[in-house]
Image (spheres, grey):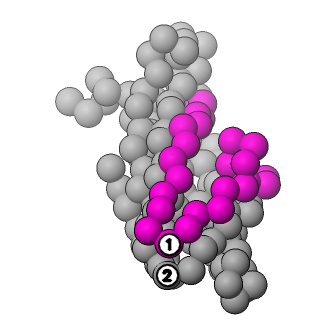
Amino acid sequence: MVTAITEGVKISVETIYQDEHSNPANEHFMFAYRIEVENLSDQSVQLMRRKWFIFDSNGTTRDVEGEGVVGLQPVIAPGESYSYVSGCNLKTDIGTMRGYYSMNNLVTETSFKVEIPEFQLVVPYRLN
């Protein structure tokens, strides 16, 4: 698990290779990732947008962005957290993802970015 804290918001990421949804012979490797967004600040925040930078070990890069996460723009009160699971497919058995969330502070009505730390997407047999 990797974590990062930006402006009182802690992001924790863990990944799981999805063997049953992968097809290595056709260069299709599926990974799930679980993200927990924890509000360590004393003010409520709302996750508005996400931007991902996805890197495949063959040199391919993709940028993905959009509103919210898994169709939601959650409000996270002080001391609370929000978790979700999503996925990413690669053409190789090793890659990485990193990015950021655009958040709003609901008290000061200001926007800020929260780093999503880089995490690895690795098929388990490559770890030996």
Q: Position of residue 103 (x, y in %)?
A: 67, 71
Question: CA gap, disc 1 to disc 2?
Answer: 5 Å
38 or 25: nearer the viewer? 38
Label 2 Cα neighbours within 10 Å, binned few <14 / some 14-19 / many ≥20: few
Please name the residue shown 58% across and 21% down the image: 28
- The amino acid sitting under disc 1 is Pro
- Say whether residue 27 is visible: no
Please name the residue shown 37% across and 61% down the image: 3
Q: Position of residue 40 (x, y in %)?
A: 43, 73
- Say whether residue 121 is visible: yes
Quadrant location of the C terminus? top left
The label on residue 42 is: 2
Q: Upstream in the sequence, badge 1 or badge 2?
A: 2
Q: Position of residue 117 (x, y in %)?
A: 46, 62
| Region in magenta | 66-90
* Residue 68 found in image quarter: bottom right
Q: Number of marks in the image?
A: 2
In the displayed structure, would residue 24 be above or below residue 15? Answer: above
Please name the residue shown 35% across and 56% down the image: 2
Q: Farthest residue in the right direction?
A: 67
Q: Position of residue 62 (x, y in %)?
A: 69, 48
* Residue 112 found in image quarter: bottom right
Per the image, the residue denoted by label 1 is: 78
Secondary structure beneath label 2: loop
The question of residue 86 being in magenta is answered with yes
The question of residue 40 being in magenta is answered with no
60 or 98: nearer the viewer? 98
Please name the residue shown 58% across and 34% down the image: 87
Is disc 1 in contact with disc 2, using a CB cutoff of under 8 Å?
yes
Q: Is 125 on the left or on the right of 38, as rendered? A: left
